[in-house]
Image (tube, rainbow, N blue to C red):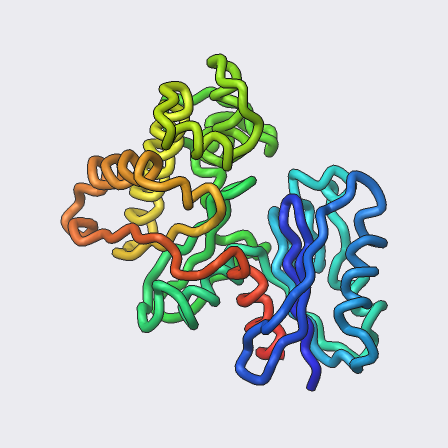
Amino acid sequence: MVALALDIGATKFAAGLVDSQGTVPSSERIQVPAAGVWPACCELLLRVAGTERVTAVGIGAAGPVDVRAGSTGPLNIPEWAGGFGIVAAVRELFPDATVRFAIDGVCLALAEQRWGAARGIADVLALTVSSGIGGGIISEGRVLMGRTGNAGHIGHIVVPGSAEPCACGGFGCVEAVASGPSSVRWARRQGWTGSTGIELSESARAGDGLARAALERAGTALGTAIASAAALLDTDLVVVGGGFAQSGDLLWRPLLDSAAAHARLIFLRELRVVPSELTDQATLAGAALLALRS
């Protein structure tokens, strides 16, 4: 069996062949183009597959998704935001392949349970904080999908006191407050002159007050959302990954303080919030596990 893994992110596609251990030894990635999104993704998949006869494909996609219909509608990919039938498109590309599809948070949770900070843990919430905020749930050792496949989509928990508009059409979602791009937008409104989450983190470490305030604001919102989700799920472990989550103590200190301030019920007293042990390949690694489940 030759298996292929595909990660559909908000800003990039990544793909690689899966080895017998369920890992992706090497991968290729491209930026999501402004137009011609599927042709670009298709070209990537064909290039990675080469002359191999692909018999299984695992797909992890930014949400929202509809696993029943096999479609994904990432809010940050306008051409697909109304829903794109990714499963049917991939099946047409690889007619001999079994295609398994899940939201990126599910893939993240699977990868954390297999190789990351959730090894051997039966109940965990795994989330990614990057250009968006997503998550996946493992309960009693089993990954939860939900009715449409969007279980664990923590980015749209509403945090108190925020009226920030969200790309989903609502307002006050933690994604609209605490993702990398959201934090950059807030900081720029206050007068900061940088343009990326990486620059924001660097400015904060260099002592810039506006950048520090942006990270504190994001961390506080994340901690509040995490405590709420932990109470709902009755979990004592939350694993946080993603590029923006690597901003250091200036994000993590308010995150942990806020989570502790809100997680006061007796069954949450041992709540642990820890950084992911995986790289930004976590979704692709989880997609590889999906492919092998085929």
Q: Residue at x 47, y 51 (%)?
A: 135
Q: Nearer the viewer, residue 9 or 87?
A: 9
Q: Nearer the viewer, residue 233 or 127?
A: 127
Q: Quadrant of the N terminus?
A: bottom right
Q: Is residue 108 left or right of residue 213?
A: right
State how many labels appear: 0
Q: Is residue 159 left or right of residue 155?
A: left
Q: Position of residue 223 (x, y in %)?
A: 32, 38
Up-down: is 110 above or below 259? Answer: below
Up-down: is 225 above or below 108? Answer: above
- Residue 2 in sight: yes
Q: Position of residue 178 (x, y in %)?
A: 45, 33
Q: Residue at x 59, y 79 (%)?
A: 292
Q: Position of residue 43 (x, y in %)?
A: 83, 60
Q: Is residue 249 left or right of residue 286?
A: left
Q: Nearer the viewer, residue 120 or 191?
A: 191
Q: Residue at x 80, y 69 (%)?
A: 91
Up-down: is 285 above or below 179? Answer: below
Q: Residue at x 62, y 74 (%)?
A: 291
Q: Position of residue 39 (x, y in %)?
A: 85, 54
Residue 66 found in image quarter:
bottom right
Q: Quadrant of the C terminus?
A: bottom right
- Residue 100 in sight: no
